[in-house]
Amino acid sequence: MTSLSPSSANRLTRQCARPNSTRLGEQVRYSVQSTEQQHNMNAGQTGKFILDRTATPEMTARPHAMKQLLRTFPEVPPADVLITSALTKRPRRPSSLQAEAAVYSELARLRVDGTEESMASFLEVTRRLSGAGSAGISMLRTDESGNAYIRWESISGALAAHEGGEAPRNSSPCGLCIDAAETVLMWRPERAYRHLSLALPPIIEKLIAPLYDSNGTALGTLWVAHHDSRSGFCLNDVEVIEQLAIQLIRQLKLRQAASEHRNVLAALAWHRDTQLSLTQELVQERSARARAEASEKSLREALVFKEAATYEAHHRVKNSLQIAASLLSMHVRTATVTEVRAALQEAQARLQVLAQVHELLYRGNNSAQEILMSTLLESIGDGLRNSFAERSAQIVLNIAAEPILLGADRAIPLALVANEIMTNAYKHAFPDEASGEIAVRLVSTPENTLILQIADDGVGIHSPPDSATLGVRLVHLFAKQLHGELSFTSTSGPRGTTVTLDMPRELIVVVPLITQSHPSLQVAAVAAD
C-alpha cells in the first residue's frame, strides 16, 4: 500500500494543531439556506438544488423521518461539518497488496473517454478501492447568467439516483472543497447543506478531492461517501482518492483534447462538404451557362436565318410586283379604250405601292419588320409625280409626315388609302388644267391617336363619293382594316376637299425611333390586333 505523501501528512498535522472550524471558517464564507427556505424550494420554487430535480417517491414519502432527522442534527455552519483532522487519528486499513494490485491493474486498463459507461466503470473502481457506498464526480459549471453551480455529473453506488442534480457553488460541499484547494472530510454534511437531508441513504461521511487543471483552474471534485455509521475513511482512502483525482484530471484533459479534435474534424468535414457543394454548384452553374450560351447562339443563328429568309421573301415579292406593274404598263400603252387604260393605270399604281412597301422592308435594317411612314409616303408621292408629270407644273404635292413606325400589316393598308386619295385628287380635283395643291399630313396626337389627312384646294365635292367605284370601296375596306374612321368634307365657299382617317387611340403605341438619321425623335407605332 502506498504511504501518505509528505504534503498530505503535513496538511493533516497542521489541521490537528487547531480547531478545524477556525482555519476554514476564517477563509470561507457561505450563505446557507434556512430550513424553511429549503422546504419552500422543495415545494415548487425554482432553484438549482439537487433534490429539486432528483427526489424520488421513496424520499418524498418519508416526511416524518426527515423532520426527525432535522431535529436530531440542528443546522450548523459549513465549517463545523469538517472533520479532516480526524484522519490522522484513525488507524490505517490492513493492506491487501494482491487485491489492490488487481484493482489498479483494472484501473490501468480502463480508459475514461467521457462516456457514461467509462465514467461509471471508473467510479466503480474508485468505490471498490475506498470501500465506499457511493462515488461521484461533480463538475463546476456556469449558467447563462454567469452564476457558478455544481452538477453531479456521474454517480456510482447508492446515490446513483441523484445523478444530474445541481446546487449553487457556495451551497455545496464540493464548493467548500474547491475553495479549500485540498482534500476534505465531512461528517453529516446535511447539517450545513439542508438540500442533502433528503438524500437517501443519508450521507454519514463524505471524502472530497478537488480537481484543478495545470493552470490552476477549478474543474470540479471527485468524492466518495459512506452511508453506514460503522464505516469511516482513513489516510489510505485520502491517498487513493488523490491519486485517482490526478488520473481523472489527465483523462478529462484527454477527453477535452478529444472533444476539440472531434470539433476540428467536424469543422474540416463541414468545410469539405461546403467546398464540395460549392464546387458542384459552380459546375452546375457553368454547365447551365454553357447551355444558355449554346441556346442563345442557336437562337441568334435562327434569328439571322429568319431575317435573311424574310428579306429574301420581301425582295422576291417586290420583284414580282414590279414585273406585274411593268406588264400592266405595257398593256396601258397598247390599250385603245380610255376606261380600260385608266383601270390598268390604277392597278399599276397599286402594285407599285405594294412593291415600294416590300422594298422598304428588305432594304431597312429592322428586325421588327416596321416601316418608317414618312419615307413610304414620300416614295408614293414621287411615283405619283412621275405618273402625272404633265400636271407637275400646275399641281403641287406636299407631304408632311412625322417619323412614325408601323408594322407591315398596318403600313400597307394605310399606304394604299393614301395612294387612292392622292390619285383621285390628281385626276378630279383640278379639271381644265387648273392649278392647285395637294397636302398630305400624318401625325400622332397627345391622345395617342394617328391621323392621316389629305386635303386639296380643288373644285371639291357636293355629295359623298360614289361607293360603287372600285377606288372608294378599297378606301373604305382599308379604313375598316385599320379600325379607323373615314370622313369626307368639302367647303361650299373656298374650293377644296379634305379626307381624314382617324385611328382610335387604343391601337396606337408611342415608341422612340432609334435611327442614325433621327436619334432623338419620338414616334408612334400601331399595336397589332
Image: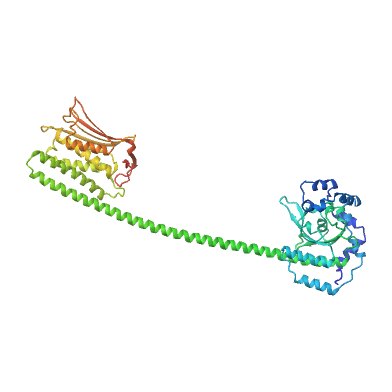
Residue found 85% across the figure and 57% down from its top: 203
Between residue 475 and residue 301, name the one nearer to us: 475
Residue found 88% across the figure and 66% down from its top: 235
Residue 118 seen in the current view: yes
Between residue 408 and residue 164, name the one nearer to us: 164
| Image quarter in which the N terminus is found | bottom right
Question: Measured from the top left, where is residue 71 in percent x and y?
Answer: 90, 49
Within the image, what quadrant is residue 480 found in?
top left
| Image quarter in which the C terminus is found | top left
Image position of 447 (left or right of 93) = left
Residue found 33% across the figure and 36% down from its top: 505
Within the image, what quadrant is residue 459 found in?
top left
Residue found 11% across the figure and 33% down from its top: 433
Between residue 74 and residue 292, name the one nearer to us: 74
Q: Is residue 257 above or below residue 408?
A: below
Residue 397 seen in the current view: no
